[in-house]
Image (spheres, grey):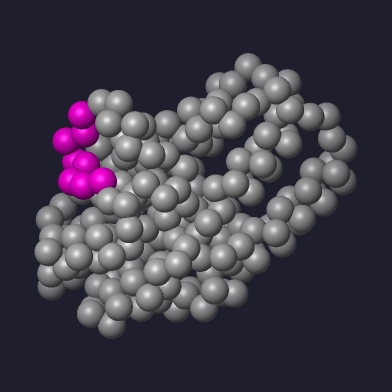
Amino acid sequence: MKRVIIFDMDGVLFDSVSISTKATLNQYPDMTIEMHKELLCGNFHEELKKINLPRKVQTEKEKTEGKILYSKIKSEIPMYCGAKNLLKELYKKGYILVLNTSAYNRNSLPLLERSGIISLFDFVATAEISKSKIDKFKIIEERYGITKKDVLFITDTLGDIREADIAHIPTVAVTWGAHNEDYFNREPHKNLLKILKTFDELGDFIEVYLG
């Protein structure tokens, strides 16, 4: 029996919320932290296109150098305490682990490799595959031939929950990333199963739900 656990990466496994926020605010000097949090209430790539704020003027060389620097900084960020142990335990138990992230390859693969966890994931769905997590949910379902009862998605943002709702993917929200319970409780979510505060709670829930 295939049991697939889909993880978001930033804010769920890696303590990267602050640096990703800083990078966006650097590109849009008039943006506030609260405005950035609101971007994460939808698909980040799409919401960024809608904002009516001036972007910092940069040459192509400056843009390229900025991307390289950001990738380097991000590749060195730590995992949350408890994340790696949970992944290893789930892998040993035979769960298929998948990443569905809004980040690009350059900001994902070096980080996963340095952290020593890339081999734990059977499939890494980055922004190169699609900027829509809804599309990637469909790809994952087709790839493994699974039904909704055999999959669980774990995220830290309201935007991801909303996309999972559209795709009818059972979801768990965690509170140690970008959004807290106030965001998750703004509206009812048919596919939101639980809001959890620790990795221990997450491990226990997975064992009961998919075990």
Which of the 4 image quadrants contains residue 74? bottom right
Say whether residue 58 is left or right of residue 6: right
Above or below for 171 versus 84? above
Please report the residue visible at 62 percent of the width from the left and 27 percent of the height from the top: 32
Q: Position of residue 50 (x, y in %)?
A: 56, 22
Q: Position of residue 24 (x, y in %)?
A: 65, 37
Above or below for 90 versus 98? below
Magenta stretch in the rendered image: 188-195
Which of the 4 image quadrants contains residue 201? bottom left
User: Considering depth in this image, is 197 or 48 the residue closer to the camera?
Assistant: 197
Q: Position of residue 197 (x, y in %)?
A: 32, 52
| Screen quadrant of the N terminus | bottom left
User: Considering depth in this image, is 70 or 1 the residue closer to the camera?
Assistant: 70
Above or below for 64 versus 33? below
**Identity of the residue furthest to the top in this view:** 52
**Tally of numbered tags:** 0
Look at the image and tell me whether residue 122 can be seen. Answer: no
Please report the residue visible at 87 percent of the width from the left and 46 percent of the height from the top: 61
Look at the image and tell me whether residue 3 can be seen. Answer: yes
Please report the residue visible at 13 percent of the width from the left and 69 percent of the height from the top: 211
